[in-house]
Amino acid sequence: WLLDRTWLSLSRPNIGPHVNQTTNPSPSVDGEKPNVAGGNALLVGPLLPQLVRFALPNIGAMLATALAAMAETRYVGSFGTPALAGMALIFPFVMLQNMLSAGAMGGGMSSAISRAIGANDQERANSLAVHSVWIGLFLGTVYMSIMELCGPWFLAALGGHGEALAHAVAYSEVAFLGSIFTWTLNTLASVLRGCGSMKAPSATLFAVAIAQVVFGGALGLGLGPLPQWGMRGVAAGGVLANALGAWYLWSYMARGESRLVLKMKGATLRTDDFTQILRVGAVACASPFQTVFTILILTKLVGTFGTHALAGYGIGTRLEFLLVPIAFAVGVASVPLVGMALGAGMVARARRAAWLAAGLAATILGVVGLVVLIAPDLWTQLFTQDESVMQAARGYFQWAGPTYALFGLGLSLYFSSLAAGTAVGPVLAGTLRLIVVAIGGAMLASWHAPAWMVFALVSAGMAAYGIATAFIVLRTSWNKVQ
């Protein structure tokens, strides 16, 4: 209750005119008259319990997905060092696809649907769900075509050669044939999140993660009577798992088991509905590219200090690979709360939901950052006992750990901004981070600076992103969101 009151005091100046009022409005909430003709429980009551209830299943699903990727890397190691190197080459493109489909474009879909439901326009919400699926199918086909045609060239441009490149290409050829399943799965999960349904998409993604490990291991290693297909088998396991997950969510929505009913046949396609989704999702798609470019620049810089420094940096970023899904889960949990509140004209409640989510994400990541700052070996010893590598990891955590909270703050506000239809600000904050890393990296390379200065640059980039995002959200009015 105290948290709700605190964020309300911060949000008061942004209360805008009431819109979409019904003839029988519900009692006012925090001074605003919400449009809750449909009995929408997400527009009333304390925000923090609702946020936690939404975030927990998302955290479970996101962590399962991250752990599945780590498990996949683990048994790929049995194919030898070149196969591991091949996985490192393909990872940015797999990560990019997931960030585009689940985060950026998916955020645009959730945003539009949640605002329609908040405005009690169920017909529009159903129409937006159909348009979202068509966008997902189209972009999945585009991504598949690009990677099948240009994938080997991209992988070679990243420095792949010899056996490592051969393994990466083998994985890529199969994995991206299933891009349409990945995009469909993440699209349907985003649509469901937009209407406040978290359990079904989270449970599905959790099951998909387990299935990916089982199918990929069985087909890749040739367990039992199955042939050993190597990297192609590992990739095929992921494709099969995503296809099953997409089929389940499609059936779930087509049967009318969710708040939204997916009726593709005979649906009328409207330019306005495509625009409503793309004006947020298309802008947000710049953010994943910024993230990938930032990672590539930093990896290149650290690589100049030798294998031990690169290994220590890799162990550090592996922790971030688990932390980002947590911030993602909390941020995504805020989307229906923010979007529906704005759809009902409750600007103060929307902003309070955004800042509560940001505070929760910052707290969780900040605690982890403090632990690895004080005792970095707790994490590093899970992967190596090499003192040189552990020393490099300590240097990384010394600088990166204190800024985890700011990074979590910025990432959560990014999703809340998508829900508010104001994606440009957080994207500009991501641009600032990329500029800091690119210019700083060029300077450090020319100075032949020590490794600790590169780790300090990582910290500066995270801090710049979090602070800039928070400042932009504070200064951006949500009163005119449509």
Image (spheres, rainbow, N blue to C red):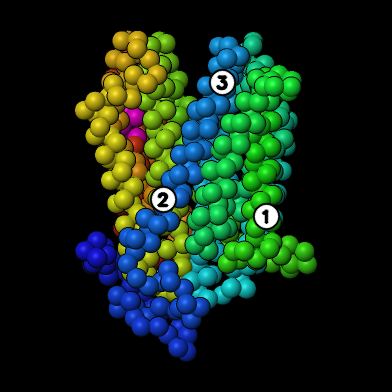
* Magenta-tinted stretch: 456-461
* Mark positioned earlier in the residue sequence (1 or 3): 3
Q: Which residue is mark 2?
A: 56
Q: Which mark is residue 75?
A: 3
Q: Amino acid at mark 1?
A: Trp
Q: Amino acid at mark 3?
A: Tyr
Residue 457 inside the magenta-drawn segment: yes
Q: Residue at x 40, y 83 (%)?
A: 26
User: Observer-nearest residue: 222 or 285?
Assistant: 222
Using residue 266 as the reference point, say whether residue 423 is left or right of it: left
Q: Marks 1 and 2, how far apart in space?
A: 23 Å
Q: In x, y percent, where is residue 333?
A: 43, 55
Q: Marks 2 and 3, how far apart in space?
A: 29 Å
User: Observer-nearest residue: 444 or 57?
Assistant: 57
Quick one: label 1, few (<14), some, or many (20+) residues within 10 Å? Answer: some
Dominant secondary-structure state across the stretch colored magenta: helix
Using residue 99 as the reference point, say whether residue 469 is left or right of it: left
Q: Residue at x 21, y 28 (%)?
A: 374
* Mark positioned earlier in the residue sequence (1 or 2): 2
Q: Marks 1 and 3, how far apart in space?
A: 31 Å
Residue 417 inside the magenta-drawn segment: no
Reply above or below: 201 against 166.
Answer: below
User: Observer-nearest residue: 200 or 463?
Assistant: 200
Quadrant hosting residue 79: top right
Q: Which mark is residue 250?
A: 1
